[in-house]
């Protein structure tokens, strides 16, 4: 069962994009997140029916949300007077919780 753009936008509502821009960025973020999860698990992230294994869907969604939040993946600092806003690099790898979930399905060498 695939994750839709609408699900990602509901999970991570855009703050600075128009609706059309947000949909494009969300679609790209989902594609990237799915590719990262698929390669990390070496294709074992889905079952024989093509559905995500338990927990994998959540990992794809959270990774896509982080990618969508900063699609350029570049650290950026905005400042106006004494106030500043620092945007981190975005996706820097799977979190420990995500790795714990994905490692159950990862093919590993003996």
Image (cartoon, grey):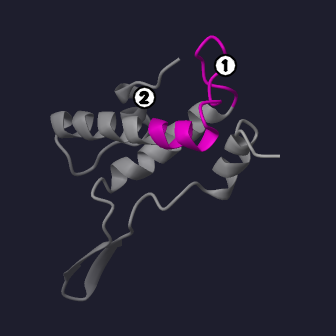
Residue at image position (71%, 42%) is 101
Q: Residue furthest front?
A: 110
Q: Residue furthest top?
A: 49
Q: Secondary structure at mark 2?
A: helix
Contact check, label 1 and label 2, Cβ < 8 Å: no
Estimate the x, y position of residue 41 in percent, counting from the top left. 63, 39
Q: In terms of depth relative to the viewer, which is nearer, 24 or 103?
A: 103
Q: Secondary structure at mark 1?
A: loop
Estimate the x, y position of residue 38 in percent, counting from the top left. 54, 36
Residue 84 in the image: above or below residue 102:
below
Q: Residues within 10 Å of mark 1 (few under 14, many from 20)?
A: few
Residue 78 magenta: no
Q: In terms of depth relative to the viewer, which is nearer, 70 or 80?
A: 70
Residue at image position (39%, 69%) is 88
Lower sequence index among marks 1 and 2: 2
Residue at image position (76%, 39%) is 104
Estimate the x, y position of residue 32 in percent, counting from the top left. 40, 41
Classify residue 3 as left or right of residue 57: left
Residue 54 in the image: above or below residue 79:
above
Residue 42 magenta: yes
What segment is highlighted magenta in the picture? 34-54
The residue wearing badge 1 is: 47
Which circle, 1 or 2, is nearer the viewer? 1
Quarter-wise, where is residue 72 in the image? bottom left
Estimate the x, y position of residue 65 in percent, counting from the top left. 43, 45
Label 1 and label 2: CA atoms lie apart by 22 Å
Q: Residues within 10 Å of mark 2 (few under 14, many from 20)?
A: few
The residue wearing badge 2 is: 7
Classify residue 73 as left or right of residue 109: left
Residue at image position (54%, 40%) is 39
The dominant secondary structure in magenta is loop
Q: In terms of depth relative to the viewer, which is nearer, 56 or 15?
A: 56
């Amino acid at each position: 069962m695939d994750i839709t753009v609408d699900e990602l936008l509901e999970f991570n509502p855009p703050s600075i994009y128009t609706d059309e821009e947000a949909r494009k960025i969300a679609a790209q973020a989902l594609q990237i997140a799915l590719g990262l999860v698929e390669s990390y698990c070496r294709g074992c992230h889905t079952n024989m029916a093509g559905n995500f294994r338990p927990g994998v869907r959540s990992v794809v969604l959270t990774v896509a949300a982080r990618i969508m939040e900063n699609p350029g993946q570049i650290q950026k600092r905005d400042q106006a007077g004494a106030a500043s806003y620092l945007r981190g690099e975005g996706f820097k790898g799977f979190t420990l919780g995500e790795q714990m979930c994905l490692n159950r399905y990862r093919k590993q060498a003996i």
